[in-house]
Image (cartoon, rainbow, N blue to C red):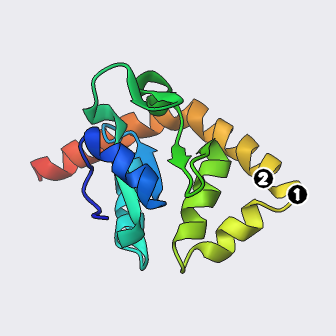
């Protein structure tokens, strides 16, 4: 599977192929930068990356609509289950050999709950961080 964001009709193919499918907010510069790191990682060819911001309102894949996908990070696991937040990151990391150790740690009892609390805190400050990131990028392009 390619690292390109497949069109909606390719989502069913990703599910059938047993690949991990990542749904991220491509309109967020922080999210896009982070996804860029994962796309370059060893093993990323077995991960589908779907930019939720590029989809029309409504269902992107069974159990996930665009509005929900834009609020939190989501991953469709190889088993067809949908994970979000810290658990979603853990399942992405499990699919990438260099990151697998982190996925295993996050899924340990207690660690997942603590990581989810940190992730929810990030979601609160995310809009401010996005504005700062965009302002810095704009000032850098003017120089």
- Residue 23 x, y percent position in the rendering: 43, 44
Tags 2 and 1 touching, CB below 8 Å: yes
**Residue depicted at x 56% and y 53%:** 77
Q: Quadrant of residue 34?
A: bottom left
Decide: few, some or many residues near mark 2? Use Cα within 10 Å; few <14, some 14-19, many ≥20: some
Compared to residue 50, the image places residue 91 above or below, namely below
Q: Is residue 143 above or below residue 128?
A: below
The furthest residue to the left? 142
Task: Decide which of 120, 129 is in the foreground and name it.
Answer: 120
Task: Report the residue at 36% width, 66% height from top.
Answer: 39
119 is higher (above) or lower (below) than 34: above
**Residue, disc 1:** 109
Q: Badge 1, how many Cα within 10 Å: few under 14, some, many 20+?
A: few
51 versus 40 height, above or below = above
Q: Secondary structure at mark 1?
A: loop
Residue at point 34%, 72% (across, down): 40
Residue at the far front in the pictured view: 16
Quarter of the rendering containing residue 82: top right
- Compared across the picture, whether 118 is left or right of 110 comes to left
Label 2 secondary element: helix
Question: Residues under labels 2 and 1: Cα distance?
Answer: 6 Å
* Residue at numbered disc 2: 112
């Amino acid at each position: 599977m390619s690292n390109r964001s497949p069109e909606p009709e390719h989502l069913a193919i990703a599910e059938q192929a047993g690949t991990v499918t990542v749904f991220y907010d491509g309109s967020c510069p922080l999210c896009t930068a982070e996804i860029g790191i994962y796309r370059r990682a060893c093993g990323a060819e077995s991960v589908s990356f779907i930019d939720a911001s590029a989809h029309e309102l409504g269902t992107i894949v069974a159990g996930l609509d665009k509005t929900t996908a834009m609020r939190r990070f989501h991953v469709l696991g190889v088993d067809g289950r949908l994970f979000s937040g810290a658990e979603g990151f853990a399942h992405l990391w499990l699919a990438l050999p260099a990151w697998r150790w982190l996925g295993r740690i996050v899924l340990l009892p207690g660690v997942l709950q603590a990581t989810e609390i940190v992730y929810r805190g990030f979601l609160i400050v995310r809009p401010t961080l996005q504005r700062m990131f965009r302002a810095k990028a704009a000032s850098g392009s003017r120089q």
